[in-house]
Image (tube, grey):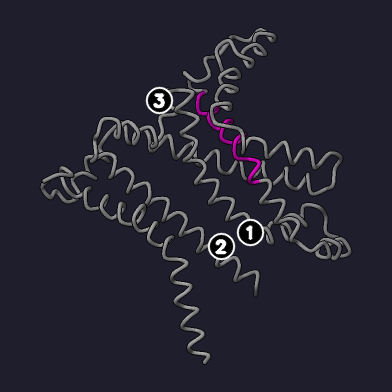
Amino acid sequence: MFSKYKKKETIMTLILIAPSVIGLLIFYIIPFIWMIIYSLFDSPINGEFVGMQNYINLLSNHAYKQAVINTAIFTMISVPLIIIISLLLSMLLDKKIHFSQNIKTAFIVPLVVPVASVIIFFELFFNKEGFLNNILYFFHIPSIDWMNSSYAMMAVITIYIWKNMGYNIILFFAGLQGIPKEYYEAASIDGAGPIAKFFHITLVYLMPTTFFVIIISIINSFKVFREVYLIAGDYPHQSIYMLQHYMNNAFRKLDYHKLVTSAILMTLVIYIFVFILFKIQKKINESIGN
């Protein structure tokens, strides 16, 4: 009787997850496998096998190398910055300050604001005759063409942090709520100060949340292309020419070799990085458990 029940339960489970599995295969796994196959040929239709030549050509391409460097710089600056700011703000909100509920709502607003509205705001903010340059003019400082100068990267980082900070704050705030207050009380009795509590209690017990926030922040850093594309176009200032620009322009030119090889390399790098993060998280969790 029990085996029959288990068999029916297994069949029902397979039926329920079948649509998701089929969709994953059709729209993600199978196309990605075909991408890998196409990257080894000189043409997607009746092409000849060229092995790794497409990858060699891509890695020697100046525009691609510039896009990789810019993307790496942007990710290495913006992700740690948004993690630190989000954590500090979430800790501030956890202190039960006045109007904390209104402040939380204000941080969530950027998540639901349409991208077009965001771009209009930042165009007015970073325009050569916009709000920021008016402030500089007030202090008799020459105006700056923010999106067409070396300051463009700073502008993009600002847009990224403003757009994604709210979600990270919510995650950190939820993690802080899960830390028992007794730990802080016991640490106070033992004479621990705020800094000791932060490093030995808050950071330690926020590790699972922090790793998740890091992964989400990295993923979101690759989505900033929408905002940059709308505010700066296909070919922005060279300091903010990202991998997404390179792949988007390759797609518009129907240059499949550059498109698929760059997409595969980017996926591989992200996978390796996330894999390493999960390994580090596992070791830290084991050390905490011991």
Give neighbour class at mark 1: few <14, some 14-19, many 20+ (Cα, 10 Å): some
Nearer-the-camera pick, 40 or 151: 40
Seen at 56% across and 35% down, the residue is 160
Q: Is residue 154 magenta?
A: yes
Q: Earlier in the sequence, mark 1 or mark 3?
A: 1
- Marks 1 and 3 sit apart, C-alpha to C-alpha, by 36 Å
Q: Residue at x 47, y 78 (%)?
A: 10
The front one of 103 and 285 is 103
Mark 2 in CB contact with mark 3 (< 8 angstroms): no
| 168 with respect to 3 (left or right) | right
- Mark 1 and 2 residues: CB-CB less than 8 Å, in contact? yes
- Secondary structure under badge 2? helix
Write down the region rendered in magenta.
Answer: 152-168
Q: Secondary structure at mark 1?
A: helix
In the picture of the structure, the residue carrying the numbered disc 1 is: 207
C-alpha gap between disc 2 and disc 3:
36 Å
